[in-house]
Image: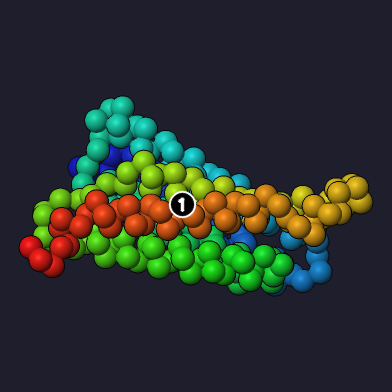
Amino acid sequence: MKQLNIPNRLSLLRLCLVPVFMALMGIPELLPGQTGMEILFSALAAFVFILCAVTDMIDGKIARKYNMITDFGKFIDPVADKFMVIGAMMMLVFCDRYAAIRPVLFWGVVIVVFRELAVTAVRLVALSAGGQVIAANMLGKIKTVTQIVCVCAAIIEPLLCKIPLVDKYLSFWGRYLPITYTSIAVMTIFTLWSGINYIVCAWKYINPNK
């Protein structure tokens, strides 16, 4: 258990917060028509998700600064990220109050899930063949940032549009949700790019000709 240093504990905390986030997202679905409760629980869900994102930034910095990088940390950190992002996106797809962005976000989620499954498979093959854990590179970290921004935008932007003053004077914003759709596009691009880059970098471990 000596590998459970501070960065690893933060990663495990992030995993534990995922079901809390999902519960907060799901509760308003049981309270249809209650806009106030919808805004409250969605805002709490956004806060928990942002807290998860903060732990994601902090654990890596602590690990590098204090030389606390471990193989367990290299493994659990991206796993926690996957549960955090995919869990959040799945809730956004299934919650009816986000039905407006569902058709576009659905395909983004499909790409994210496919990418994460492929990278996880490659990571496991590389571990068994080369005996080492391949840590996430800078492109993978940028991908995670774009996914976090996408989820935050998808949760918060529709909420802002339900505020009376915003709905009255910026009604077009609620119809088009420009930040949400832009963030989905950027996230999709970096998700594909980072996935392809990871497989190329790890190909020496999975090349069937070797």
Disc 1 marks which residue?
A: 190
The figure's colour scheme reads rainbow
Nearest the eye: 36 or 81: 81
Please determine whether, in this image, residue 31 is positioned above or below residue 149: below
Residue at figure coordinates x 31%, y 27% from the top left? 65
Q: Is residue 139 left or right of residue 185?
A: left
| x and y percentages locating residue 129 in the rendered image | 11, 60
When asked about the image quadrant of residue 199, the answer is bottom left
The vertical placement of 119 against 135, above or below, is below
From this viewpoint, is residue 201 visible? yes
Residue farthest toward the right in the current orientation of the protein? 168
Q: Is residue 20 visible?
A: no
Examine the image and state in which quarter residue 158 appears.
Answer: bottom right
Extreme residue toward the front, this view: 209
| Amino acid type, residue under disc 1 in the picture | Phe
Tell me the residue at 53%/64% (across/down): 108
Q: Circle 1: is it few (<14), some (14-19), or many (20+) Cα within 10 Å? A: many
For residue 83, above or below residue 145: below
Residue at 30% over, 53% down: 198
Exactly how many numbered labels are in the figure?
A: 1
Q: Is residue 118 left or right of residue 23?
A: left
Residue 25 screen position, x and y as percent: 62, 62
Q: Nearer the viewer, residue 185 or 170?
A: 185
Residue 197 point in image, percent of width and height = 32, 52
Give SS at disc 1: helix
For residue 146, side relative to residue 161 (left or right): left
Q: Residue at x 24, y 51 (%)?
A: 201
Image location (x, y in percent) of residue 200: 26, 55
- Taking the image as shown, residue 193 lies to the left or right of residue 169, namely left
